[in-house]
Amino acid sequence: MVTGGMSQFARAFPTRKTEELVVDAFVMMAEMLDMSPIELRSYVQAGFYGHFADHFGDQLLGEAAIHDRLGLDPLPGIGIKTGGATGGYNMWTAMMAVASGTVDCALAVGWERMDEVPTDEGNNYIACAADRDWETFLGHIYAGYYAPMATRYWETIAKKDPKFRETLAAIAVKHRGYACHNPFAHGAMKITVDDVLKSPVVADPIRALDCCLMSVGAAGVVFCDEATANEFHKRCPKMKPLRVWIGAGTHTLRVADRRDMEIPLLPHETPDLYKDRSERYPGFTCFLATRMASNQAYRMAGVMDPLDDFDIGELHDAFTISDLQSYEDCGFRPYGRGREFVESGDCYLVNPHTGKRGRLPTNLSGGLIGCMHAVGATGEMQVVEVALHLWGRHGEIHGDPKRWERFGKKKPDDWKDLQVPNARRGMAISHAGVGSHVTCTVLADPDHLYRKEVGA
Amino acid sequence: MRTPADHNVTIVGTYPHGYKFRGEFHTGEPSRPIKDEHGTMVGVTKPRRLVHVHSLGGEAPFFQGISENGRLLATVCRTPGCPGSGSIYLPFRIHCPDCLARMQVLDVTDKAIATAKVYTFIVTSRTGAFNTLETPIRFVDIQFPFACTFLKGYMVGAGAPAIGLRVVPVFRTEAPTYTIKDLAWVVEGTTAKDLPKGFAFASRTPFPGAEVLP
C-alpha cells in the first residue's frame, strides 16, 4: 500500500455530487505522496470500486461514472458489492489483481451516498441487505437484526451483569470521543456512559448512541507490486510502502441459518480454551466470517498473537455489541471474555487505569460510531486510518488547521494527536450484514514484519 | 401512498402461459428544484412510484402454508450419504447446503406447537419505511429442537418475550399479506379469543403433499 486518502464525511452533502467526494479522496492520495493527481494516475492500471447500494445513489453502474470522472478510461474497472464489507472486499480484489501480476498498480476506492432519501427510507434500504423474504419485512430496520445478538450475549454470556451494559456504553464514549480529534469525522461527541444508557432505545438493548452513523463520503487506497512500490518510495521517501495481507470469510446471510460447529482456532489459541463452553458456536454471539478472515490473514502474515503483534486496530463497530464481538472473533480475548479488552484499558490509546499506552488501541478514527459509516467507503477509511499511524503521519493529517477549516470546522482547542507512538503493524476489519462477509486487512512496515521472510 | 389496487395492477394468466403484467406499475411525477436559502439550485427531486413483483420460487409452499393453509413448513435433506442428511431446515431452504439436492418439504406444524422456544428476542419501536407491524414490535428468534437453524419472527397477543419462553405459531390466514408477517408467535396457553384480528391457530389439515414430521 503506497497511499490512501479520504473525503470529508457528513450525514449529508446536499451541494456536492458523489464524484466530487471521490475526487477529494484521490487528490488526498496524491498529496500524501507529494504528487499531482495526474502523476499518481499515471501509475494506476485498473480501478476497483465499491458502493454498497445502487438504491441510495439511484444510479446503477455508478462505477463507470466514477471511473470516467477520475480520468481512468479506458483502463479496466470493476465494481465490488458486499454490503458493509464492500470496502474490504474491494481492497481484497485489488490486492489479488496485483498479487496475480495482472496489474502493477491498482486503485481501490469506495463511497456511499446515503443522504438522498429520508432516514427511515435509508433504514429500509439497508434492511434490504437482510433476507428480503424472511427478514426485511420484519421491521425494515437493521438494528432489529443485531439487537437479538446483543440480547443473547447479554443474557447467556454476560449473565445480565449491569456492568457489562456500561462496558458497551464505554465503547460508544471512546469512539465518539476519539472522533473529536478527527476532522474527517461527523459523529464527534463528548459524552458519558450515562448519556449512552439514557439515549433513546432503537431496538432494546441497543440505544441510539450505541449505533453507527449514516454517512456520505469516499475513501481509497493504492496497492502496488514491490517494484512499483519502491519507485513510489524513491519519489517520496516519507511514505514507506506498507506490506498488506487480506483474509476474507463469509457466513450465511441470515444469522438464523448458522449451524452449530466447532470453533476454528487462531494461532495463539488451544482447544482447551473452549472445553467448558456451553453456548452454541457461532450462534448469535460470534461471527464465524470474522474468525475465518482473521485466521487467514494472521496465518498469511505470520501474526502469532494479535495483542502482542499489532500496535493499532480498527474494528467494525456498527453497534457497540458488534465491536465487542469482534474482539473475540479476532482473538484479542477468548470467546466469552471480550469485555475484558475494554475493562482492562487495552483498547485505549492511553489506558485509563495505568496512564500508559493501551496494549492495542482500536478505532482511534472514531470508527463507524464516531467517524462515519458511508458503507462502501468504510473499509478503506479504516485501512487509511491505520496506515496513517504506520506512516507516522496521523497527527500531521488530523491536526492540520487548514483541513479543519476546509471542512467548515474549527480545530478544537483541546485537539490531541492520537498518533500511536512507533506504530509498525496494524489491522482493520471490514464487515457486512450480520457477519455475512468479512475481511481482515493486516498491514506492516516492511522493516517490521511479523516473521522473518525467506530472502528478506 | 397508493396501493397496487389503486394502480389497478394485475398479473394476467398463470405461469408459464400468458403471464403478463397489466395495470399501472409505475408512475412518474414532475421533478422539482431544490434550492438553498439564496435561491441557488443545488438539486432536484426524483419522485416515482413503482410496484415490484417477486418470484418466491421453491419457497412458495412455505408462504402459501402460512398465509392460506395455517401450516408451518420446513425442509429436510434425504440424500443418502450426504453429511447433512436428515438435517431439518427452518427457514425453509430449497436445496441442501451440503449436497445441493432439492430437499423434501416437511410439515412441522404440530412438532413446532409442541416444542418451539424463544432463543433470543428484542423489543423495538423504531422501524424503517414501509413497516406495517404495530409498535412496539416483539421480535423473537425461535429455536426448534428438531431443526439445525433458527426462525426469525414476532410475537402477538399478551406476554413479554424471554429466552426459553414456550411459544406456539399463529397464522394470519384472514386477509393475509403473503409475506413472513403472516406467521407470528404467541405465548403457550394463549386462547383463540386473545389472538389479534386476522390470526388463527394452526389448521388441523396437513399441507397437501408435504411429509408430516411425527
Image (spheres, coloured by chain):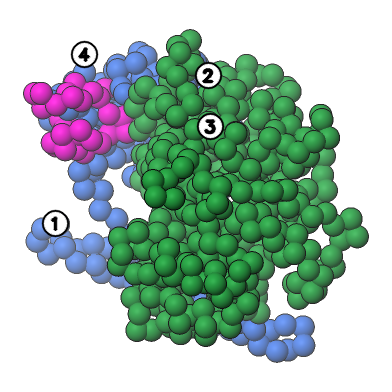
Chain colours: A green, B blue
- Secondary structure beneath label 2: loop
Residue A95 seen? yes
Q: Residue at x 27, y 63 (%)?
A: B10
Q: Position of residue A272 (x, y in %)?
A: 45, 13
Image mark for residue B163 = 2
Same subunit: marks 2 and 3: no
Q: Which residue is mark 1?
A: B15
Rendered image: mark on residue B68: none
Question: Mark 1 or 2 closer to N-term?
Answer: 1
* Closest to the observer, A219 or A240: A240
**Residue at screen point 47% across, 67% down:** A229
Q: CA distance from mark 2 to mark 4?
A: 26 Å
Q: Mark 4 — residue?
A: B214
**Residue beneath disc 3:** A305
Question: Does the segment drawn in magenta span residue B143?
Answer: no
Q: Please name the predominant secondary structure of the magenta segment in the image.
A: loop
